[in-house]
Each structure stands twice: as C-alpha cells, then as structure tokens.
C-alpha cells in the first residue's frame, strides 16, 4: 500500500517514469489490488502505449469487473487500435453496468470509424439532447456531414465549437489528487482540470483547498 501511494505521488507531481516503475512494484507486492494495474494502465494509455495499457487494465478487471471507467478506457484504447468488434463489445459491457450515454458515445465513435454514420447519428441525437457536451455535438456534426446533411452539420459543429475535453467520472483516479504536493500545486492542478472541462474533479479539489485557505484570492 505504501509503495502504491508513492507511485501516485510520483505521478501527480510530474514523475511518470518513476510512477510506472513503482506501480509495477506495488502490483507485484499486492497482486489482488485493483488500483495498481488500473493506474498503471491509465499512465500507459496517456503515453500512447495502448497495447500495454490494455494488458494492464485487463488485469485490473480480472480483480473487479464491475468498475465502469475501466471498461470505458478499455473501449477507447481498443478503438485507437482499430479493433472495432472488441471495442463494440466493451462499450456494450459498460452499458450493461450503467454507463448510459458515456457508453453510447463510445459506440457512436466506433460506428463513425467504420463509416456507419446513420447508426452513429441515431445514437448521438438523443444523447445530445440530454447531455449537451461540445464533444458530442462535434461527433454528431461528423455524422451529419458524411450523410450530406450540411445544415444539420453546421448547427452541430457550432454547438460543439467550445474546446472541452470529454471525460467521465472516475472516483478511483480522482483519489490520487490528494497526493499533489502543497497548496499551490493542488491549485494549479485544479486550474488545469477546469481548462480541460473536468469540472466535477476540479470542484472536489477546490472544496478541499477551501478548508485550508478560505480567503485565498486565487482560490
């Protein structure tokens, strides 16, 4: 457990190479702990090592196969590799676990990559009505454009013009933020999350910092 915490501290404070090695050590010491192969997978995926990330996330899912964010990441990495059938199965699994529109977006992305724009639009249209995220509108714009629906595409792209990362809640991943060093470091991390559209995670960090310095102007 201590070595895993050290790995988290390395990661969130900007030492990814040390974090990778230490997650591997923590995993070897506690092979039945979900977090260490999962966090290792996220770090590998961030570095573009999708095959290694898939192997690692599969180790974590063998320990806990009901954690929705792990399935969503798995689908994303399979999609990056062009493994469309496996990605579809993975997103369907996430849907059965309650991922809702998040799984639908993944399925739509997979369909778009296979040039199945009619099916992708059919999934995205109801999602965009209740989950008004710029990324979803941009996907819908792509589907409309490929179908020759130029006016619908223009409207969708206009609604999706705001640059905002598409993220999903991941409580286990968010827990690492407690290891960001110092008040200033945590504040900078929260600001980056806000810029990336990670509002829920940023708010959690900012509320914790509020307990430390309630009157800080930057906070």
Image (cartoon, rainbow, N blue to C red):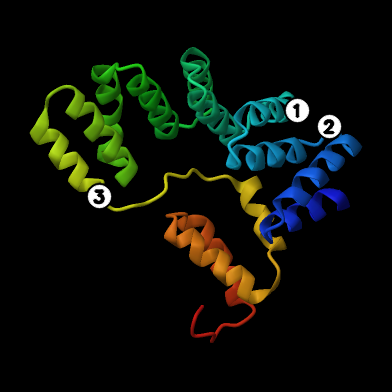
Residue displayed at 56% across by 33% down: 73
Q: In which quarter of the image is residue 116?
A: top left
**Number of residues whose C-alpha sits closer than 10 Å to that of mark 2, classed few (under 14), some (14–19) or many (20 or more):** some
Contact between labelled residues 3 and 1, with CB atoms less than 8 Å apart: no
Mark 1 surroundings: few (<14), some (14-19) or many (≥20) residues within 10 A: some
**Residue at numbered disc 2:** 32
Front residue of 68 and 198: 198
The residue at which mark 3 appears reads as: 161
Reading the image, the residue beneath label 1 is 63
Confirm or deny contact between disc 3 and disc 2 (CB under 8 A): no
User: Could you say where residue 75 lies in the image, as x and y percent from the top left?
Assistant: 52, 26
* Whole-number angstrom distance, CA of label 3 to CA of label 2: 44 Å
Q: In this view, does 11 lie above or below 157?
A: below
Left/right placement of residue 40 relative to residue 161 reads: right
Please report contact status of discs 1 and 2: CB closer than 8 Å, yes or no.
Answer: yes
Mark whose residue sits in front, 3 or 2:
3
| Mark-to-mark CA distance, 1 and 2 | 6 Å
Mark 1 or mark 3: whose residue is earlier in sequence: 1
Is disc 1 placed on a helix, strand or loop? helix
Q: Residue at x 39, y 33 (%)?
A: 101
* Residue 100: percent from left, percent from top: 43, 31
* Residue depth check, mark 1 versus mark 3: number of the one nearer the observer: 3
User: Does label 1 or label 2 sit earlier along the sequence?
Assistant: 2
Q: Could you tell me how far apart the alpha carbons at marks 1 and 3 are, in whole angstroms?
A: 40 Å
Q: Of all residues shown, which one is farthest toward the top?
A: 85
Residue 204: horizontal and vertical position, in percent? 56, 62
Which residue occupies 60% across, 82% down? 213
């Amino acid at each position: 457990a201590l070595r895993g915490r050290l790995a988290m501290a390395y990661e969130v404070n900007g030492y990814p190479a040390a974090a990778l090695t230490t997650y591997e050590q923590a995993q070897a010491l506690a092979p039945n702990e979900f977090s260490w192969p999962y966090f290792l997978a996220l770090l590998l995926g961030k570095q573009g090592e999708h095959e290694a990330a898939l192997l690692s996330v599969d180790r974590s899912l063998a320990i806990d196969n009901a954690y929705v964010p792990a399935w969503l990441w798995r689908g994303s990495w399979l999609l990056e590799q062009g493994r469309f059938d496996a990605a579809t199965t993975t997103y369907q699994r996430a849907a059965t676990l309650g991922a809702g529109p998040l799984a639908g977006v993944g399925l739509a992305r997979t369909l778009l990559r296979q040039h199945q724009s009619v099916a992708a639009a059919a999934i995205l249209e109801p999602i965009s009505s209740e989950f008004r995220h710029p990324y979803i509108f941009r996907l819908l714009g792509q589907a409309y454009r490929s179908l020759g629906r130029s006016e619908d595409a223009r409207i969708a792209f206009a609604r999706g013009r705001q640059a905002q990362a598409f993220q999903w809640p991941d409580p286990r991943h968010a827990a690492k933020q407690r290891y960001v060093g110092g008040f200033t470091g945590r504040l900078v991390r929260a600001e980056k999350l806000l810029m990336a559209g990670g509002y829920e995670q940023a708010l959690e960090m900012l509320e914790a910092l509020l307990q430390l310095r309630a009157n800080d102007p930057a906070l």
